[in-house]
Image: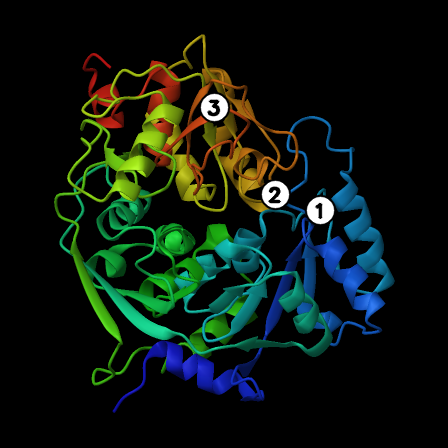
Amino acid sequence: MGSTLFDKIWNAHRVGVREDGRELLYIDRHVVHDLHAPHAFKALSRQGYTVRRKDLTRVVQDHTAPTRSNLGTLSDNMRVSQVLSQQHAVPVVDHQSAQHGISHITSVEQGWALPGKTLACPDSHASTVGALGCLAFGCGTTELVHILATQTMALSKPKQLRMTLTGQLQAGVNAKDVALHLIRTFGITAGRGYAIEYAGPIVQAMDLEGRMTLCNMTIEWGGRTCLIAPDAQTLAWYQAPENEIPAELVAQVTRQMPGLFTDAEARFDLELTLDCSAVQPQITWGTDPSQVVGVNDPVPLLDGSGAEQQARHQQALNYMGVEAGQSLHGLSVQRVFIGSCTNARLSDLREAARVVGHRRVADHVVALVVPGSAKIKAQAEAEGLDRVFVQAGFEWHASGCSMCAGANGEVGQSGERCVATSNRNFENRQGRGVKTHLASPATAAACAIAGHIVDAASLMSGATP
């Protein structure tokens, strides 16, 4: 029997088996963000350990980094993580450096995540880098200390699931819409206990940045890690001049790619297929990423599901201030956030800028664009994208997690309705009482201009928004 891509990477990094049955996996790169670094380094010191591979570890300031004008202000987490990292002689990516950005984005930009390698990060969206065939795992503080001390991670080998996405996307539909539609179709627990491989013509047609958006959302339907086999699209991203990847790294990726695929005779524990031909631009109506509709469709009615499901449905309706059967179209929006590790790459900013054009943000809307890294910010500014946004009335920020994490004080006001390109819409996620609708960059930009929820296609066609 053949091997899956997951098996090939797992077996190549398997160090041994613990007495408790978990396997020890060697970690090629370890990226630690400022929210968890202080706790982990303090615990490491208390236990009398040092960082085993300082050269393979990076500390990134992203979750609590301010992205507004007060860039000189360090949060407590940033200050402590910087001091402790220096004590342990671990490199820190300072929030003002040219390498700064959201960890899941800079991991790819800087070549820390590579096809066929393993990566750990104390964040559930570590799976983002699965887009290039890098096996990544989010980890908690205890696991984080273990990795710092041993450069290995103790894991129970998960079952495997292949998600095949078929069909052809309609114009104006992108990876974020596909991810939301997938979660809507299968639910928030369908991937639990599985390592997921995305495959099929929809995935093959996506560029690497679209694949990163899809993989980023894996945790939102229960999966801890995921992979997409590297191919011509992967190599094209590394070779693109705008990405400024050093020639030696491109050569390394080219050498690593052969063999990084699932053998034809390999078997998965579960196979799922989703036809995406009819997918429309998506937007969430509720308080988890599965509570989704097409942007022009009504909120679903309470159906004959169980009492627990109906209670969850009603609670989401109550929090969001919407009713079953109601159309979201025309619902007033007070805030728009374009950013996060899900949708803050250069292609995302270009997509949003195309919608904005020479239009203006509605007077009652606070709209902000937060690039995913300092590199993306500089590239966007070189293309003039920042001017498109600023002239339209958007705030143009430095890179960081910003409103997605809300750990840096960048939150909305209670009662506001926010359209966001981030990955989570839980109650109070972006500020106490803030009602978050997840959508693509195009949809978010259109909502900022119209001042209410609207389909980007109708805005750009000149139809009444």
Residue 374, quarter of the rendered image: top right
* Residue 340 image offset from top left, x and y in percent: 50, 41
Helix, strand or loop for disc 3: helix
Residue 314 or residue 204, whichever sits in front: 314
Q: Which residue is mark 2?
A: 374
Q: In the current view of this chain or complex, which residue is farthest to the right?
A: 87
Q: Are marks 1 and 3 in contact (CB under 8 Å)?
A: no
Residue 46, quarter of the rendered image: bottom right
Helix, strand or loop for disc 2: helix
Three-letter code for the amino acid on which mark 1 is drawn = Ser
* Residue 416 image offset from top left, x and y in percent: 47, 18
Q: Earlier in the sequence, mark 1 or mark 3?
A: 1
Q: Earlier in the sequence, mark 1 or mark 2?
A: 1
> Residue at 37% across / 61% down in the picture?
236
Measured Cα–Cα span from mark 1 to mark 2: 8 Å
* Residue 419 image offset from top left, x and y in percent: 40, 27
Q: Is residue 398 left or right of residue 284?
A: right
Three-letter code for the amino acid on which mark 3 is drawn = Phe
- Residue 175 visible? The answer is yes
The quadrant of the picture occupied by the N terminus is bottom left
* Residue 52 image offset from top left, x and y in percent: 75, 76
Residue 162 or residue 105, whichever sits in front: 162
Q: Are marks 3 and 2 in contact (CB under 8 Å)?
A: no
Q: Are marks 1 and 2 in contact (CB under 8 Å)?
A: yes
Q: Which residue is mark 1?
A: 97
Three-letter code for the amino acid on which mark 2 is drawn = Ala
Q: Earlier in the sequence, mark 3 or mark 2?
A: 2
Q: Which residue is mark 3?
A: 389
Residue 212 or residue 425, whichever sits in front: 425
Measured Cα–Cα span from mark 3 to mark 2: 17 Å
The quadrant of the picture occupied by the C terminus is top left
In the image, residue 112 sits, relative to residue 99, either above or below, namely below
